[in-house]
Amino acid sequence: MKWMIATLVLLFAVTLVAQQQDMMTAPSMPNADVRHEIQSTISTAPEFNAANITATVTDNSVVLAGYVTSEQQRIEALNVAASFAGDREVVDHIDVGGSLYGD
């Protein structure tokens, strides 16, 4: 009887650990949702009014590309991406001080 209880406790502990590992390795949000949240946040925030940033999201990375008018905007855009990226790497392809028209 003792060995049955010990086996059940061990089985329960192994199941718990496996569930926790699955939760830690699963992406926090689907790629399309991550992209939508990043683009929505950047397009509606007043601090990005002169910025042109796009996000490309895969299972492993979030790539921000485009231009901003200041280093502060670049940092804020990267922070926005990081807040939704989950386990994904945030890759910076943002130009500072430029514009779509070569200013």
Image (spheres, rainbow, N blue to C red):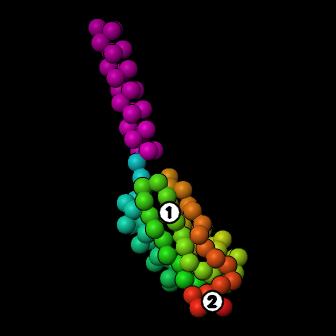
What residue sits 50% from the left and 52% below the top? 87
What residue sits 34% from the left and 23% below the top? 11
Which residue does the numbered mark 1 point to in the structure image? 62
- In the image, residue 1 above or below residue 49: above
Instruction: Identify the mark at residue 103; answer none if there is no mark.
Output: none
| Secondary structure predominantly adopted by residues drawn in magenta | helix
Q: Disc 1 on helix, strand or loop? A: strand
Q: Disc 2 on helix, strand or loop? A: loop
The magenta stretch spans residue 4:
yes
What residue sits 57% from the left and 87% below the top? 100
Percent x, y of residue 13: 40, 26
Q: In the picture, residue 37 is in which quadrant?
A: bottom left
- In the image, residue 60 above or below residue 13: below
- The residue segment tinted magenta is 1-25
In the figure, is residue 87 to the left or right of 14? right
Q: Is residue 65 visible?
A: yes
Disc 1 to disc 2, how far (Cα)?
25 Å
- In the image, residue 25 above or below residue 46: above
Percent x, y of residue 63: 52, 65
Q: Is the residue marked by circle 2 packed among few (<14), some (14-19), or many (20+) residues within 10 Å? A: few
Instruction: Identify the mark at residue 102; answer none if there is no mark.
Output: 2
Classify the position of the C terminus by image quarter.
bottom right
Q: In the picture, residue 22 is in which quadrant?
A: top left
The magenta stretch spans residue 17:
yes
- Give amino acid for label 1: Val
- Give amino acid for label 2: Gly
